[in-house]
Amino acid sequence: MITSLHNPLVKQCRQLHQGKYRHHHQQLLLEGTHLIMEACAVRYPLLRVYSTPAWQGKNPVLYQHLQEIAEHLESVSEPVLAALATTQTPDGIVAIAPRRPAASLELHSLGLVLEGIQDPGNLGTLIRTAAAAEVEGIYLGPGCVDLEHPKVLRATAGQWFRLGFKQSSDLSQDLAPYQTSSNWQIIATRPSPSSCNYWDLDYCQPTIFLLGSEGQGLSPELRAQASQEVYIPQAPGVESLNVGVAAALLLYEVKRQRRHHAQGIESSD
């Protein structure tokens, strides 16, 4: 059992608290029982798992499963576990996993494009909401927080493993195929009521939403890529909604309309 904070494995794991080392080692840090359960559910590879004897005693089934799938298991003391984790009250387990390989992303019905989302909690919430609303994938532009930030991972509640992503260096280039298709609409939100209310648009066709940070919004360059702008009505004096809340309103309006449309087709048959 590892009891020393000076153990080389401890130092290696702690490096993954910082983005530059996650990129250098091509690894990320998973914290907490729920996140690791979700990784196991999709058979995401786990390189090294650190857990306390107390955690192992409380989670015998998951621990046995980890013995079968993880490359290395390490028992650690409570102080060592606390040093490995980024949270103030870790629940007894962390793991090192490989970074997701860069991949292409192709949408067929519903997608998000994110620009300048710098708060890891907001990005994690966006990912969790997108997965719940059956978004097929997310493009992340320059200026977004690290997709593998520990707080992002925790805030996704495990949906990080189930959604497609592409970290884009040129969002305009990635949007080009959808812009040239007559089937797709690209929607930007606007903070003023000069555009139509978001519920007045027809979302039964393939749709991509462009979302920026609360502070800066969308850049003029990305806004120019939109085929339509919509407005989320707000009370006087309210400057903006949290981007995760805005995404939930938009995405669930898509679900509502498409469900209603599908029911209408079924009833006509």
Image (spheres, grey):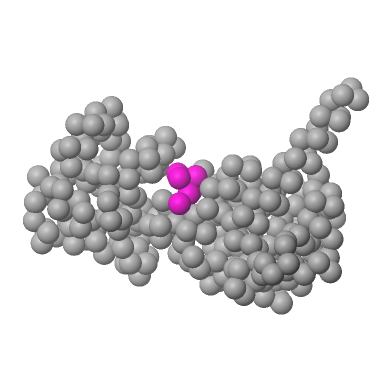
- Percent position (x, y) of residue 152? 44, 56
Inspect the magenta stretch and tell me whether residue 157 lies in it. yes
Of the pair 12 and 196, the residue shown nearer to us: 196
Inspect the magenta stretch and tell me whether residue 125 lies in it. no
For the question of whether residue 7 can be seen, the reply is yes
Residue at position x 80%, y 51% from top?
A: 199
Residue found at the very far bottom of the displayed protein: 220
- Percent position (x, y) of residue 153? 42, 52
Q: Is residue 76 above or below residue 239?
A: above
Residue at position x 40%, y 57% from top?
A: 151
> Horizontally, is 18 left or right of 192 in the view?
left
- Percent position (x, y) of residue 127? 54, 51
Image quarter where the C terminus lies is: top right
Q: Hey, which quadrant is residue 165 in on the image? A: bottom right
Residue at position x 87%, y 24% from top?
A: 267
Residue found at the very far front of the displayed protein: 236
Of the pair 145 and 41, the residue shown nearer to us: 145
Image quarter where the N terminus lies is: top left
Q: Hey, which quadrant is residue 148 in on the image? A: bottom left
Q: Which residues are magenta?
A: 155-160
- Percent position (x, y) of residue 158? 45, 44
Instruction: Report the label total.
Output: 0
Q: Is residue 218 above or below residue 44?
A: below
> Horizontally, is 125 left or right of 81 in the view?
right
Of the pair 248 and 159, the residue shown nearer to us: 248
Residue at position x 14%, y 53% from top?
A: 79
For the question of whether residue 43 can be seen, the reply is no
